[in-house]
Image: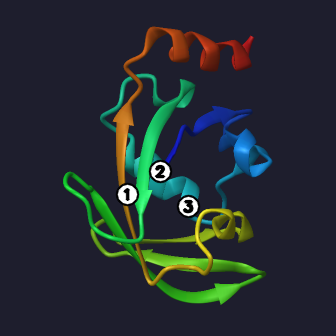
Amino acid sequence: MVISPYKFKGQWVFDDADKGLKREAFVAGADTIIDAMTEGIKNAAKGFNMLFSATPFPGYQVKVQRIGYEYGGTIYACPELEMVGWLCPALLKYFTEAPEFIYAQVKQIKSPTLRRRLARRFQ
């Protein structure tokens, strides 16, 4: 699965019209995990691609493990980054239940057309 987070008013968010999500925010530690994962991506705040899956895939960069539930969402620990983050109930729009593990990779958006479309959000 792929989403394209970007920063809106200083907060990491993403849109997914197919799932009925608009400016869905990453909060409670998930935002700081994204900060760490995107350190090497130029202009990440304007948008980047995040690939994620409940199973490992070639090139994944981070593996998070479910460690609990709180406020309808799921808490995940990221040992590689020594961080913990909370994913809101929107996670269940992608999985039937919160997976034990989530594997993720971040990539720079290479399409100039998509980058321009994302950049218009900031104007």
> Answer yes or no: do the residues labelled 2 and 1 have beta carbons within 8 Å?
no
Which kind of residue does numbered mark 1 sit on? Answer: Ala
Q: How many numbered discs?
A: 3
28 relative to 123 in the view: left or right:
left
Which residue does the numbered mark 2 point to in the structure image?
34
96 relative to 54 in the view: left or right:
right
Residue 38 placement: quadrant: top left
Q: Residue furthest bottom?
A: 68
Circle 1 packing at 10 Å, graded few (<14), some (14-19), many (20+), is many
Q: Position of residue 93 (x, y in %)?
A: 68, 63
Q: Nearer the viewer, mark 3 or mark 1?
A: 1
Which residue does the numbered mark 3 point to in the structure image?
30
Residue lying at 61% horizontally and 81% vertically, measured from the top left: 97
Q: Element at badge 3?
A: helix
Q: Gap between marks 3 and 1, in whole Å?
A: 12 Å
Q: Position of residue 19 (x, y in %)?
A: 73, 51
Circle 2 packing at 10 Å, graded few (<14), some (14-19), many (20+), is some
Q: What mark, if any, has residue 104 been given in the picture?
A: 1
Q: Gap between marks 2 and 1, in whole Å?
A: 10 Å
Which kind of residue does numbered mark 2 sit on? Answer: Ile
> Answer yes or no: do the residues labelled 3 and 2 have beta carbons within 8 Å?
yes
Circle 3 packing at 10 Å, graded few (<14), some (14-19), many (20+), is many
